[in-house]
Amino acid sequence: GAGVSQTPSNKVTEKGKYVELRCDPISGHTALYWYRQSLGQGPEFLIYFQGTGAADDSGLPNDRFFAVRPEGSVSTLKIQRTERGDSAVYLCASSLFSTGDEQFFGPGTRLTVL
Amino acid sequence: DAKTTQPTSMDCAEGRAANLPCNHSTISGNEYVYWYRQIHSQGPQYIIHGLKNNETNEMASLIITEDRKSSTLILPHATLRDTAVYYCIVRVLGGAQKLVFGQGTRLTINP
């Protein structure tokens, strides 16, 4: 079966631009997570959805970052007024439920802000 | 979540058992020990988790000490494809759902 997919795989943008990163979770998975990974570091939690609602957005660094999951499946991470410090790999994961199940990760989107 | 401490890097010969240690001395009674690994340019991959009993699956074995303050992930017959960063994470089952990753151990399997 298909795993978690993320598009685009690479995104290069200029400082100040707006970007959208997409995540397609495994079909039927109710929980969806976004993480960010800087070079040489472990992934850092951003936000977690249970169904359509954001159950925990404590990891979003500031109000330039926003994520949606309108139909409880696909999610989009949106970054406004990008800064060079936003450059990282953005990882998406999904799990069947939210009760501590194994999280399945996608390959990530590498964002480079010039 | 409780913090974990892992060695920064380890080497192991192909075909030998790789034993990756993790210290979690402040672990709470309801926290599980999870292991994930991340192969270069891929997302993390779940390996195994346990509470207090030793666990084994097709990928690895997890040995948790009786006081639960440390654990060891064992890859019984390491292959070159096991070269990756291995993360030990403690987490309450049913609690906060985020995974809190540390720096992990960079395991290199040598031919």
Image (cartoon, coloured by chain):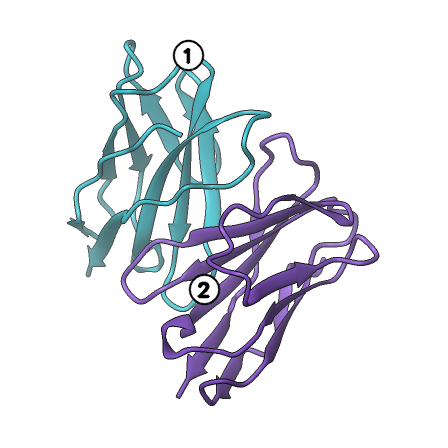
Chain colours: A purple, B cyan
Q: Residue A31, relative to residue A101: is it above or below?
A: below
Mark 1 or 2: in front is 1
Q: Residue B54, relative to residue B23: is it above or below?
A: above
Pick the front one: B63 or A90: A90
Q: Secondary structure at mark 2?
A: loop
Where is residue B35? Give x, y as percent.
40, 38
Amino acid type, residue under disc 1 in the picture: Gly
The residue pinned by badge 2 equals B42
Where is residue B48? Give x, y as percent.
46, 35
Q: Chain of mark 1?
A: B
Task: Answer few, some or many: residues within 10 Å of disc 1's Cα (few below 14, many 20 plus, some between 14 and 19).
Answer: few
- Residue B29: which numbered mark, if any? 1
* Co-location on one chain, circles 1 and 2: yes
Residue name at image x 39 percent, y 55 percent = B38
Q: Chain of mark 2?
A: B
Pick the front one: B58 or A12: A12
Q: Residue furthest right?
A: A71
Toward which corner of the image does residue A79 lie, by quadrant? bottom right
Where is residue B78? Give x, y as percent.
29, 48
Does any portion of residue A44 appear in the rendered image? yes
Q: Quadrant of the N terminus of chain A?
A: bottom right
Q: Is residue B100 left or right of residue A99?
A: left
Q: Quadrant of the C terminus of chain A?
A: bottom left
Q: Secondary structure at mark 1?
A: loop
Residue name at image x 45 percent, y 24 percent = B32
Where is residue B107? Give x, y as percent.
24, 52
Does any portion of residue B56 appear in the rendered image? no
